Image (cartoon, rainbow, N blue to C red):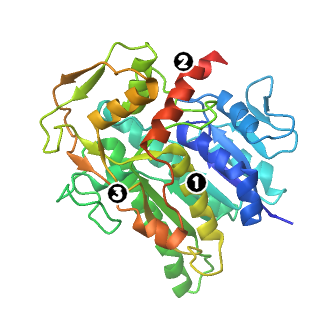
Amino acid sequence: MATQKRILVTGGCGYIGSHTLVSLLDPVTSSQTNIQYSVVVVDNLANSSHESLRRVADISSLDGGFSMDKDGSGGKDPKGRLIFRKVDCCDASALRAVFEEFASKGGFDAAVHFAGLKAVGESKLIPLKYYEVNIGATWTLLNLMEEYGCRSIVFSSSATVYGVAKDEKKNLKETDEVGVTITNPYGRTKFMIEQILGDFHGSHALLREQGKEAKDWSVAILRYFNPAGAHPSGKMGEDPNGVPNNLMPFVAQVAVGRRPHVTVFGNDYDTPDGTGIRDYLHVMDLADGHVAALRYMGSNNGKSGNGKLNVFNLGTGTGYSVIDMIKAMGKAVGKPIPNVVGPRRQGDVTIYVADPSLAKEEMGWEAKKNLDDMCNDIWSWQTNNPNGYVDA
């Protein structure tokens, strides 16, 4: 019989969070690992839709599907594998109510923390809001996890913590310098949260040295680069509010006719075609990486992150330029994507590519999907949902 584990997923209605739910609820993975996850999602829906949860239930073949409560405050499937509570993680009393609700049912085995603001450009305009929300939500979550005895967390961080690399032509390793040359408040909040997690993890050994009771935490910090793609079914994908901040959803909206062209910000970088190079990672590979981190920290056999502070890059190790991505999307669509060249954006770097070898060595995780998969899946999502979840 499979081991049952309940996972708290903050920000689980968003792009990466919702795809991670699919990986957590995947019956094939459950049979292979002998672990059956149930999930409790908390999200304030500020930049997401609960419709994503209905799609998750559909893809995961949950009996009876997912339905929202009439007042919009929550929802679930009939067997309680996928439960939703509309909660802002900065609201300590509301988040405490979620912990209290499930305390009598065994509580949570771990948390996967996505909740937060994530637009790089916006963070420069309203930095105080980013510090308040991203750091405040994490502070509230960690306090409640400690109080209710849930001491395992996967933090969805970002490659932005590396800032401007000293040698941009080398793939970034987890041991490379972080925090010093970050170019935006969003990245600094991610770095600060990593520091908080490190300090908090280390404090428990110090407390025990003083004769105080303090149980170890298991922490996995995942630094990922540029997520792209969608679920292969075409039922789920990235659905940003307003103008997309990321390249590929913008390209997809141009392809479907919602926008006239893609602006390429600078074509005079020191790269083969003059445009910036990034490590694009299929969102389902990224989702699987979060689940791999949970298994890694929950294992007591062989290589294990149980009781440790773990940091991993998630990427492909291969970089593609902006022009590469536009051409690849044109291939998936079957026609060229209109684009124009504009000036560089302040803070953009030339090359940003991961060295993901540690994740493979320790967790057994590696990216499986390629550039064509990303673009084909984006196009399937976009053509089936030209206006995103609004169509539902």
Q: Amino acid at mark 1?
A: Asp
User: For residue 44, what is the image quadrant?
Assistant: top right
Of pointers 1 and 2, the one earlier in the residue sequence: 1
Depth check: give the residue in front, 344 or 137: 344
Q: CA distance from mark 1 to mark 2?
A: 26 Å
**Residue 334 in the image: x percent, y percent?**
43, 23
- Could you classify mark 3 by the number of other residues whose Cα lies within 10 Å: few (under 14), some (14-19), or many (20 or more)? many
User: For residue 16, what is the image quadrant?
Assistant: top right
* Disc on res. 72: none
Q: CA distance from mark 3 to mark 2?
A: 32 Å
Of pointers 3 and 1, the one earlier in the residue sequence: 1
Image point (72%, 38%), residue name: 59
Q: Are marks 1 and 2 in contact (CB under 8 Å)?
A: no
Could you tell me which secondary element the residue under label 2 belongs to? loop
The residue singled out by tag 2 in the image is 386
291 relative position to 148: left or right: left
The residue singled out by tag 1 in the image is 288
